[in-house]
Image: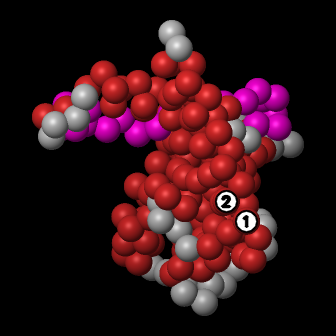
Amino acid sequence: MMRDLTFTDVERLEAEDIDLALDKLSMDEDAFRAFYDRTSRSLWGYLSRLTGDPGQADDLLQESYFRLLRTRGTWDNEAHRRAYLFRIATNLVRDGRRRARSRPTVALPDADVTASASAGGDLAEHTARRQDLRRAMDRLRPRDRALLWLAYAQGHAHSEIAETLGVKTGSVKLLLFRARRKLAGVMRSAADRRRHT
């Protein structure tokens, strides 16, 4: 029979797991910290947009890195490791959706609205367009949202998107075209409705 674990025992076990994982990854602690610093902000943004929940994005971010460290995979280079990390994160989001059986809301990043207004833009029009975009993104399928976000917000190459989402590299261009067309259609409908009200 297993004795009750204390908080200290759990911390020690987690530290041992991470140390073991770092050894398998052929990265020392400093190398991992540098990789984390280079990738965590963009990964968090990606997770936040997919889930619509910054708190959930925080949890999934940490789980993604932990799972990356626990894998026994080898990577050709940092781009491959980064794509694998995004794939882990994507799968965590998918698994969460399956469990929750509900569609999340995608939150777009808050832009500095006053900066665009002071640059000569119409604040009301800018705000309305952002709301239209937010609603349009919410109406897209999760894969379409992920495709658009990875390509245009994160600037990922087609090969990275393919690896992250588990599709063929050759199909990314067509999938992006279709996702853009769907988004444009939803945006046009929203703009038409706004003009007629």
Residue 20: x, y in percent?
Answer: 60, 72
Q: Position of residue 149 (x, y in %)?
A: 55, 52
Disc 1: which residue: 174
Horizontal placement of 58 versus 117: left or right? right
Q: Mark 2 Cα within 10 Å, few/some/many (few <14, many 20+)? A: some
Q: CA distance from mark 2 to mark 1?
A: 5 Å
Q: Quadrant of residue 23?
A: bottom right
> For numbered disc 1, what is the local secondary structure?
helix
Task: Establish if 45 lies above or below 82.
Answer: above
**Which region shows up in magenta?**
97-116
Q: Are marks 2 and 1 in contact (CB under 8 Å)?
A: yes
Tell me if residue 98 is in the magenta stretch. Answer: yes
Q: Is residue 1 above or below residue 173?
A: above
User: Which residue corresponds to the image point at 60% horizontal and 79% vertical from the top-left?
Assistant: 80
Amino acid type, callout 1: Leu
Tag of residue 27: none
Label 2 sits on residue:
177
For label 2, the SS is: helix
